Image (cartoon, rainbow, N blue to C red):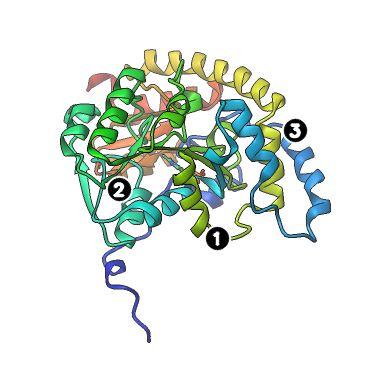
Amino acid sequence: MVKPRAQLYSLSVCEHGGKREQVAKGKILDFSTNLNPYGPPDFVFDAIKAAIEGLGRYPDNECSELRAKISKKIGCREEEVLVGAGVSELIQLVAYSFAKTRVLMLKHTYGEYEIAARVIGAEVKRIEMPGLRILPELIVDEMQPEDVVFLCNPNNPTGQYLGKEELEQLIEAAERIDALLVLDEAYVDFVRAAFSSHSCISSTQNLLILRSLTKSFAIPGVRIGYAIGSEGAIKTLRKIKAPWGVSVFADSIGTAVMGAEGDIFLKATIEKIERSKERIENELAIHSDANLYILDVGDAGKKKQELLKHGVVVRDCTSFGLPSHVRFSVRTDEENDLLIHSLLEECNVKER
Ligand SMILES: Cc1ncc(COP(=O)(O)O)c(C=O)c1O
């Protein structure tokens, strides 16, 4: 048997949220996937129908219409945008294209960065998070020339968001040191008054931004996201991107959600989510800048099982290096109430 490459031996498949079978049967409320609880929006189904007639042709490899829409919306050039099959694909493209000897990432963050880095044989350097906080100065202290720095902002699973000043500090450091700062903004739509990081793209070669449509529109089954970066960086990613990776359906849905209907849907639902967050934060005495929270419950694996008996599934954060924390997302008020009551009953949250 042909053996896999040496660096793959010690790799395991990255863990993700979601309890597919039980959730699909409607038996369990899924708080583990961080999706907008009000989606997918109805107009997405019209976009699917519209795409059917394109089934017999290869998809538009450039996703021209969607790319044009994204660039117009965020005010950058089309050459600075690449559409991909979700941020998942883009993370791998970034690692294959730019990672050499070292990749930096937070101590507790999304697991796919490490896999992408190790596949290409790069050293993974984790940045400490004292008190589970991101300290930008610790990232700057670690940066070396040629490093690729994955920063999940807001961070999965801790929910902290670094704002304008901190991001500008990191971008300035990446330029000075000549590292590549990669901002994964998969959850940025849920952040109140987030900094428009894309406004920096045209003035730096050292920044790449990855955005997902998955969470905002609750379309994990679609696989669509985009990267924004300098023309040179986007051209490089484009070279190794698998052809036709964005299906005609994903392209059509992406084009629909990036339009006016998508804006209306987002505005209305994010307002509701923000109101729900106030309630969760008051009840459980926690805070997050995003639509996801972590909570110290003592033994995450055990508590997750106990919570399942209440009909709710949360994410055990052991794979994030946080074996005493669970992560959960914001759902509708009625659903959040069930989670809050279950947490108060099972986890002694108030007595911590
Ligand atoms: C931080 C982060 N980035 C990227 C992804 C994957 O995004 P996509 O669905 O666009 O591939 C996830 C999904 O859980 C995530 O949490």
Q: Looking at the picture, does residue 157 appear above or below residue 238?
A: above
Identify the image quadrant of the N terminus. Answer: bottom left
- The front one of 159 and 92 is 92
Q: Residue at x 42, y 27 (%)?
A: 200
| Residue occupied by mark 2 | 319
Identify the image quadrant of the C terminus. Answer: top left
| Residue occupied by mark 3 | 43
Q: Secondary structure at mark 3?
A: helix
Q: How far apart in space, not on screen, are marks 3 and 1 (Cα)?
A: 29 Å
Q: Residue at x 41, y 50 (%)?
A: 94
Residue 47: image location, x then y, percent? 76, 40
Which of the labelled discs sits on residue 242, or is there none?
1
Inspect the image, locate mark 3, and give the three-letter code of the amino acid beneath it: Phe
**Pointer 3 local density, CA inside 10 Å: few below 14, some 14–19, many at least 20:** some
Which of the labelled discs sits on residue 232, or is there none?
none
Relative to 123, 59 lies left or right: right
Relative to 73, 4 lies left or right: left
- Sequence-earlier tag: 2 or 1: 1
Report which quarter residue 39 is drawn in: top right
Q: Looking at the picture, does residue 296 appear above or below residue 233?
A: above
Report which quarter residue 64 is drawn in: top right
Q: Looking at the picture, does residue 35 appear above or below residue 12?
A: above
Residue 339: image location, x then y, percent? 45, 28
Relative to 261, 234 lies left or right: left
Inspect the image, locate mark 1, and give the three-letter code of the amino acid beneath it: Ala
- Sequence-earlier tag: 3 or 2: 3
